[in-house]
Image: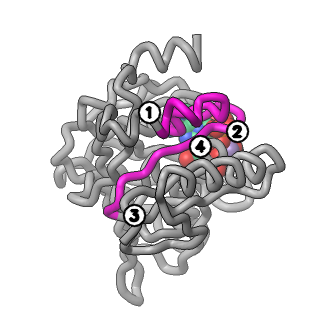
Amino acid sequence: MSKIITLNSNNVKKSLETRELLHKKLVEVGFNVDYEYNPQAELIISIGGDGCFLQTVRDYNIPNIPLVGINTGHLGFFPDISPDNIDSFIKSYLEKDYIIQELPLIQTKVITSKGSCDIFGINEAVIKGDNSRTIHLKLNINNKHVQNFSGDGLIVSTSAGSTAYNYAVGGSIVDTSLNVIQVAPISPINTNAYRCFTSSIICSHDSLVNICPECEFENSTLVVVDGLQYNFNEIDNIRLSISDRKIKLLRTSSYEFWSRVCEKFL
Ligand code: NAP
Ligand code: MN
């Protein structure tokens, strides 16, 4: 029986062209190709940018199957392969010349008066107010009250997400080989009325970060995970932690975190 590879692309012309070309080349070397999630597949290839990669993981319900990205997008921090290097990618894949990077997910447990809901993310969970309002949140870490936050919101990110929204608000870039949780404030207010930390803080991977909206915000707090917004009513508190669930990201054997950072950011 032939081995199966699943291809998932966004609808950008370059991605669709790349998908067609890749399909042809994979069939030539003996693979079966699917455009939908197939639990029998040995590899999932996402064709697009980071957004498409995040969407693939979401659409396929956090697959256990290794993923690799071909970057036809803008930045492409997750997708490792350029569309110009498809041939060398297929060759390395067949020769098993690659590494698998395991990326732990951030779990966001939203507790409301009606029950609880778990959302898993690769980059981050953002807790913010609706309608561009200032939000007031109580921040606890490991059951210790750290601070009352006032401002636009808090970003709770994984190391893999440290280069995304976290970095844009002045958070630190963290090597993905370190498994930590980073909490970064978005436009924190620092006046005689409100005080909160102005830098991001970094906690160990086994920390429990608890964010509790002050009572008038229990119906107007937004939870945005990897760019997708979730609305809840009567939020009591939001618990964030590093989950046991991981994705397996296939990287070329030359992949090195800091070279990637220089290439993409500096
Ligand atoms: P998007 O608006 O296209 O994303 C904004 C940018 O973030 C894109 O250039 C995207 O890369 C890049 N990106 C995503 N994950 C990254 C990572 N781990 N490291 C470095 N850059 C990364 O929306 P999207 O593509 O659906 O991505 C969702 C993410 O956007 C969220 O998880 C959040 O981190 C980020 N975001 C950033 C800001 C900000 O910087 N002010 C605001 C909202 C959301 P591609 O161009 O390859 O897609
Ligand atoms: Mn994008």
Q: Is mark 2 within 8 Å of ligand 1?
A: yes
Q: Which residue is mark 2?
A: 73
Q: Which residue is mark 3?
A: 3
Regarding mark 2 in the picture, which secondary structure is present there? loop
Q: Is mark 1 within 8 Å of ligand 1?
A: yes
Mark 2 is on which residue type?
Answer: Gly
Report the mark closest to the observer, 2 or 1: 2
Tell me how many marks there are. Answer: 4
* Residue 27 locus on image (x, y percent): 56, 57
Q: In percent of the image, x 46 and y 27: which residue is there? A: 171
Q: Is residue 63 left or right of residue 18?
A: left
Q: Is mark 4 within 8 Å of ligand 1?
A: yes
Regarding mark 4 in the picture, which secondary structure is present there? helix
* Residue 81 locus on image (x, y percent): 55, 33
Is residue 89 located in the magenta-colored stretch of the structure?
Answer: yes
Q: Is mark 3 within 8 Å of ligand 1?
A: no
Q: CA distance from mark 4 to mark 1?
A: 14 Å
Q: Which residue is mark 4?
A: 50
Task: Report the image quarter containing ligand 2.
Answer: top right
Regarding mark 1 in the picture, which secondary structure is present there? helix
Sequence order check, earlier mark of 3 and 2: 3
Sequence order check, earlier mark of 2 and 1: 2
* Residue 197 locus on image (x, y percent): 41, 30
Q: CA distance from mark 1 to mark 3?
A: 35 Å
Query: What stretch of residues is rendered in magenta?
Result: 64-90
Q: Is residue 237 above or below residue 244?
A: below
Give yes or no for contact between labels 4 and 3 (Cβ–Cβ under 8 Å).
no
Is residue 197 located in the magenta-colored stretch of the structure?
Answer: no
Sequence order check, earlier mark of 4 and 1: 4
Give yes or no for contact between labels 3 and 2 (Cβ–Cβ under 8 Å).
no
Give yes or no for contact between labels 4 and 1 (Cβ–Cβ under 8 Å).
no
Mark 3 is on which residue type?
Answer: Lys
